[in-house]
Each structure stands twice: as C-alpha cells, then as structure tokens.
Image (tube, helix red, strand yellow):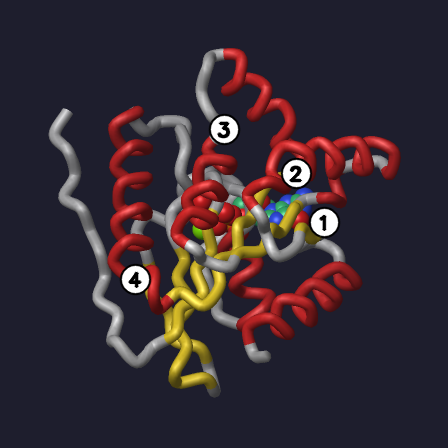
Amino acid sequence: MAREEIYIPDVTEDKELIIFLGRPNSGKSSWINIIFGIKRVKGKMAGSTKKIAVLNVPNHPKLNIVDVPGWGRVAGKSRQFASDIKDQIIEFIDAYSTQIKLAVLVIDLYSYKDVSERMSKKGFIPLDIEFAELLNKKGINFIILANKKDRFTSHHLDTNVDYLKESIIYTEPIFIQPCSAKNPDSTRKTREIVNSYIFS
Ligand SMILES: Nc1nc2c(ncn2[C@@H]2O[C@H](COP(=O)(O)OP(=O)(O)OP(=O)(O)O)[C@@H](O)[C@H]2O)c(=O)[nH]1
Ligand SMILES: [Mg+2]
C-alpha cells in the first residue's frame, strides 16, 4: 500500500509546545479538553484524532498544544497506517524538539499490562516504552498520565501502577500520575499538577 505523505504542521518559532502522546484511545484528547478547556473530538472507537493538530490556548498566546493521533494498530486500519502515524510523530518531535516544553504521555493503565506483555512475548518493545525512551534520549521533559484508573478495583490498581512504574521508570519521567478523566476529584488534582509544570 502507498505510503501516506508525511504531514508535519507548521509551528512558529516563538511558540512553546506541550505535546500529548499515547496509544489510540488512551485519553489524550479528553485530557487536553480537561486541562486547557479546548474542545477536541473524543471517541469510543480508537482513531478519533487523525492528524497532528497544533492548537492555540485561550489566554496563553505563546503556547501551543499538540494533539496527535494514537500510535499502534487501530481496528479497520492497516499496519502501514499505524507505521505512517508513528513516523509523523517522530518527525514532528525531531523538527520541534527545542520548542517542546513538556510532553504528556497518556497511557491507558487498564490495558497497559496486557498489551505490554503481549508485545514483549512477540519480541517487540511496547510502543509506550519506545516513545518514553525517545523523549528521554531527546532530553524532552515528560510526565505520564496513567489514565482510566476508574476501571480498577483498588487492589488491582496498585498492582498495575507498580507494573507500569517498574517497566518505565528508567526512562526518567518527571512523575507518573494515576488518574481518571471520568472522576471530578482526579481531574481537578491532575489539572493542578500538570498546570504547575506548564506555567511555572
Ligand atoms: N473509563 C474511562 N474512560 C475514559 C477515560 N479517559 C478517556 N476515556 C474514554 O476513552 C475514549 C477515548 O478517549 P479520547 O480522549 O478520544 O482518546 P484519544 O487518546 O484522544 O484517542 P485517539 O485520538 O483515537 O488516539 C473515550 O470514549 C473517552 O470517553 C478514563 O479516565 N476512564
Ligand atoms: Mg484523540
């Protein structure tokens, strides 16, 4: 199948970027909406965000938020499609690494362990790890939102948070925040923490 053209949106030099990254359906657009009040398309089906989008932030003219499509296989899309999206994200990060103030890696904690174990069994590095390694290598500060914690009972939550931390802590995220976009207490707390890094 023909390779899609690499699509890299333009960003002006005076802007600082906050980029949201993560697998399809992990909750990137939901968190952009919660933290910055920017309405984004959200969806039950993975693949809602189709292109890298550079967004203005109300009252913060020097800041742009970057919403990217999830990387990884999406039902109904080819392997090539997933691979093209991954290339686009890597090219974007390469092109603008000096302007990226913070990356927010949104991980679906509920499926993380299963997906990672399945990838590892096949001999692949889980994609979240690959991107965390890339951010670390590029010297880009990043935080991890371990999202969808509402889907666990408390015992399973602890086990899964521990698993995530063990697998990814060496990539040196600033912090890992278990959270839920569906829980008002969690959204308030997480928004405060993320804002303190962005607007410090
Ligand atoms: N239970 C639960 N569902 C969530 C949470 N966060 C997001 N969702 C749901 O997960 C689905 C995907 O959310 P999006 O914000 O569109 O995810 P995305 O990462 O932007 O997805 P793509 O653009 O397709 O890569 C939607 O149905 C959301 O309502 C959460 O914390 N808990
Ligand atoms: Mg999205």
Q: Secondary structure at mark 1?
A: strand
User: Which label sits in the foreground, 4 or 2?
Assistant: 4
Mark 4 or mark 3: whose residue is earlier in sequence: 4
| Amino acid of disc 4 | Tyr
Question: Label 3's element?
Answer: loop
Q: Residues within 10 Å of mark 4 (few under 14, many from 20)?
A: some
Q: Quick one: quadrant of the C terminus?
A: bottom right
Which secondary structure lies at badge 2?
helix
Q: Residue at x 54, y 72 (%)?
A: 36
- Name the residue that disc number 1 marks: 178
**What is the x, y in percent for residue 154?**
86, 38
* Residue of label 4: 96
| Residue 141 screen position, x and y as percent | 51, 59
Mark 3: amino acid: Pro
Tell me, yes or no, whether the two marked residues, 1 and 2, touch with CB atoms within 8 Å: yes
Q: Residues within 10 Å of mark 2 (few under 14, many from 20)?
A: many
Disc 4 or 1, which lies upstream in sequence? 4
- For image coordinates 33% across by 54% down, the residue present is 93
Q: Above or below — where is 124 with respect to 161?
A: above
